[in-house]
Image (tube, grey):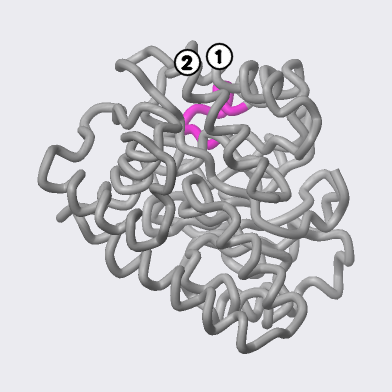
Amino acid sequence: MKSPLTGIVPPMVTPLRGRDELDVAGLERLIEHIIDGGVAGLFILGTTGEGPSLGYRLRKELIERTCRLARGRVPVLVGITDTAFVESVNVARWSADAGADAVVLAPPYYLPEGQPELQEYLDHLVPELPLPLFLYNMPSLTKVQYELDTVRRAMDNPRIIGLKDSSGNMIYFHRAVGLLKHRPDWTLLIGPEEMLADAVFAGGHGGVNGGANFHPRLYVELFRAAQAGDNVRVRELHAQVMHISDNLYRVGRHSSAIIKGIKCALSLLGVCDDFMAEPFHRFRGPEREKVQHLLAGLNLLHNRTP
């Protein structure tokens, strides 16, 4: 895996057929669909992948199958976020054994920790990990963010190699860009796809964007246009991303709507099942019709039979 890692690294959904059953055929189709879109890597067991909602047996199976199906064509990053220190280490070891390239860690998300406690946690955890580590800043779900002083300290550890920022705070992101001078090999990726172009213009290295599950080429082309400074093309592609954000991600009424929408789109495209991990459930008929209409407008249903 090159450093820094540049481009689009989709936070891959986990295709499911039941509470503890992978959609194995769908997983293979999904990986081929995403890689064919020109992405720079795969990130599994993140938020969009419903990682914390999955049992450990299924996580292990997903890691093994994904690494085998990726066949080294792109790096595989694995989320190891957990409330239990030893389980994060266990998942990291499974990842290394399966051939993954790096692991990704958000702060433990139940009892909020202070920054000194978070730094000490990293000091204890990183020596136990067999793979390099990306930090994952997701304060809306973890209640704690990696403050910039903590990020700066983390840069002193060569085994911590990057940050995925999903805070939605561009001031934070700009200040994180300012830290890159301390580590030229450090990777800085943006989570919210609505901010992808701005993040690249600011000096970031790419995005971990959920929509790239079903429309990877759009996000790859937007990244490349921003990287090339093609403002006309960026505006055109960014408008498509915003259309997806303003429509697909608002079909449902709850915060789970984004993942439901992405999984529903993949189901309608014939890629994989849209079963959701409990306590969430797939879209029903009226919502599916809205998603189908959106996909038709994006010309993604050509030659597809939902």
Camera-side residue of 38 and 159:
38
How far apart are the two marked residues, 1 and 2, measured between alpha carbons?
A: 5 Å
Number of numbered discs present? 2
Residue drawn at x 36%, y 70% as measured from the top left: 243
Camera-side residue of 43 and 28:
28
Quadrant where the image shows the C terminus = top left
In the depicted structure, whether residue 102 falls above or below residue 144: above
Q: Mark 2 points at which residue?
A: 58
Left or right of 246? Residue 173 is right
Q: Which amino acid does label 2 sit on?
A: Leu
Residue 79's disc number: none
Residue at the left extreme, as displayed: 286
| Quadrant housing residue 128 | top right
Q: Mark 1 points at which residue?
A: 61
| Residue 194 coordinates in the image, percent (x, y) | 46, 71
Q: Which structural element holds mark 2?
A: helix
Q: Are marks 1 and 2 in contact (CB under 8 Å)?
A: yes
| Residue 294 coordinates in the image, percent (x, y) | 30, 58
| Residue 260 coordinates in the image, percent (x, y) | 29, 43
| Quadrant housing residue 61 | top right
Left or right of 214? Residue 136 is right
Q: Which structural element holds mark 1?
A: helix
Q: What residue type is labelled 1?
A: Glu
* Region in magenta: 81-88
